[in-house]
Structure formats: structure tokens, C-alpha cells
Amino acid sequence: MLLLHQNPEQPLCVNSIDKLTCFNYLSAESVVPRLDTKLESSGAEFLVLGNLLLRRIPAYKTYTNMPGYDLVATNAEKHTSARIQVKSRWETGASGFPMANFDCDFVVAA
């Protein structure tokens, strides 16, 4: 079964049961669609949060989309907090993590 998306302003997407391929009309080159990794990234955030809580470090997840950080760890005795950004990759052999915002105190690769 094939589904064709035909709009001259957007790439042509041919969707078969086992793969998705997009072709650009103007350059006729293959365009790889971006994967939806929201579930995996949220899972990585909860993994780091769980590890912090197991070590008795008070922490919480910022459910509203805070640019620059995903978790906040606090120390009530010293009245301090640390902003933590969690990075995860779908690709197993990735060489790094793309970062657009460095407004955090720690970066955790999970």
C-alpha cells in the first residue's frame, strides 16, 4: 500500500508499510523525515529524575516547556537549586547531542 502526498510546495512523501521516503521536487534528493522522539526524551527525563530521588536529592520535572532545562534539583538547607538539562539520542552511534540553549547548570546524557 502506498500513500502519495502531492503538494508542489512540500516534499513528495511516499509511505509504504515498511519505510517512509521523502523526495524534494526541486532537487530530487532524498529528505529523511525527522523522528518523533518525545516519548523517549520524556522517558530519559524521568529516568534521571528517578535516579536523583533514589539518592534523596529533592528534584522535580518542569512540565511547562522551560527553555534550557528539564529538571530542577533543590537543597532546602542551603536555599539553592540546580537546573538540569537531559539529553538523549535515538541513534545508538551518535557522535554528540545538539544543544541550542545553554541556560542550565548541568547537562545529563541519558
Image (cartoon, helix red, strand yellow):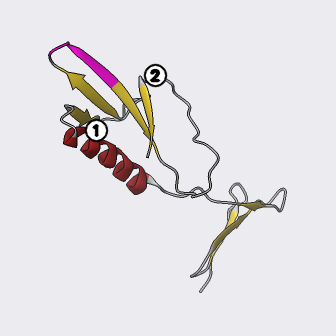
Q: Residue at x 65, y 47 (%)?
A: 95
Q: Can residue 4 be seen at all in this image of the molecule? A: no
Q: Residue at x 41, y 55 (%)?
A: 40
- Circle 1 crowding by C-alpha within 10 Å: few under 14, some 14–19, many from 20: few
Question: Which dot marks residue 74?
Answer: none
In magenta stretch: residue 79: yes
Establish if 62 lies above or below 44.
above
* Magenta residues, start to end: 77-82
Q: Can residue 94 be seen at all in this image of the molecule? A: yes
Q: In the rendered structure, which amino acid carries the disc numbered 1?
A: Tyr
Question: Which dot marks residue 103?
Answer: 2
Percent across and percent down for residue 19 are 62, 75
Relative placement, left or right, of 46 versus 21 is left
Percent across and percent down for residue 35 are 54, 58
Q: In the rendered structure, which amino acid carries the disc numbered 2?
A: Asp
Q: Residue at x 42, y 33 (%)?
A: 85
- Circle 2 crowding by C-alpha within 10 Å: few under 14, some 14–19, many from 20: few
Say which quadrant the N terminus sits in. Answer: bottom right
Q: Quick one: SS at disc 2?
A: loop
The numbered mark, 2 or 1, whose residue comes first in the sequence reads 1
Relative placement, left or right, of 78 versus 29 is left
In magenta stretch: residue 7: no
Percent across and percent down for residue 54 are 20, 43
